[in-house]
Amino acid sequence: MKGLLYLVIGTPKADGISIICKHTEQERGANNSKILLPPENQEQICTFSNWKWVEGKFFFESAADEQNEEWFLFLSNQINLADQLEASLELLNAQILLELARVISFVNCDDLDHKDIVEWMDGVAHFSDILCFSNRTNTNGKKLNEFVERYKSMHYPLESIILSKRKS
């Protein structure tokens, strides 16, 4: 593997896969991108490969495809996030031509009322370069603003983006 690795973290139904798929299809001529989804994701939104979790490491069936310049590695909600981040570091150490570009996180605003969300969000925000919030409504808007202000006040070096529901 060579090129840029984007780690993608997300809550269920946060639309991260469809958004990244649209990006890779629009940029098809500029960059050769590969989307790597966890085994539990079988969505046929775009061209992708599934990765496997083998003995605490990522296993890619298509990793020898050297023509790709961008790799979007979607992390699993079924496997410990810290273990996956450690495995990502091992992957970067093993693949010397691969470099970490960004950590992008997608959060479904409907999940912001979950009882354990603050701890999870703090951990995700710590590693993320970008927090993308989807499915904002009047009901969850107050909670969303609390999280955005929380990370601004903590001076986290990340961008917070509220995604529009408009389909483009």
Image (tube, grey):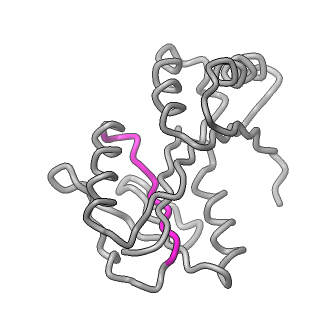
Magenta residue check for 72: yes
Q: Looking at the image, which is closer to me, 103 or 163?
A: 103
What percent of the width, then of the height, locates residue 164?
Answer: 81, 44
Position above or below: 162 against 101: above
Q: Residue at x 60, y 51 (%)?
A: 16
Q: Residue at x 53, y 67 (%)?
A: 44
**Residue 95 lies in quadrant:** bottom left
Q: Residue at x 70, y 36 (%)?
A: 160
State left or right for residue 48 relative to residue 105.
left
Q: Residue at x 75, y 21 (%)?
A: 145
**Residue 51 lies in quadrant:** bottom left
Q: Looking at the image, which is closer to me, 108 or 118?
A: 118
What percent of the width, then of the height, locates residue 101?
Answer: 52, 58
- Which residue, as the protein is rendered here, is positioned at the far top? 115
Position above or below: 27 against 108: below
What percent of the width, then of the height, locates residue 46?
Answer: 57, 70
Q: Which residues are magenta?
A: 69-79
**In this figure, what is the number of numbered marks?**
0
What percent of the width, then of the height, locates residue 35?
Answer: 49, 67
Q: Quadrant of the N terminus?
A: bottom left
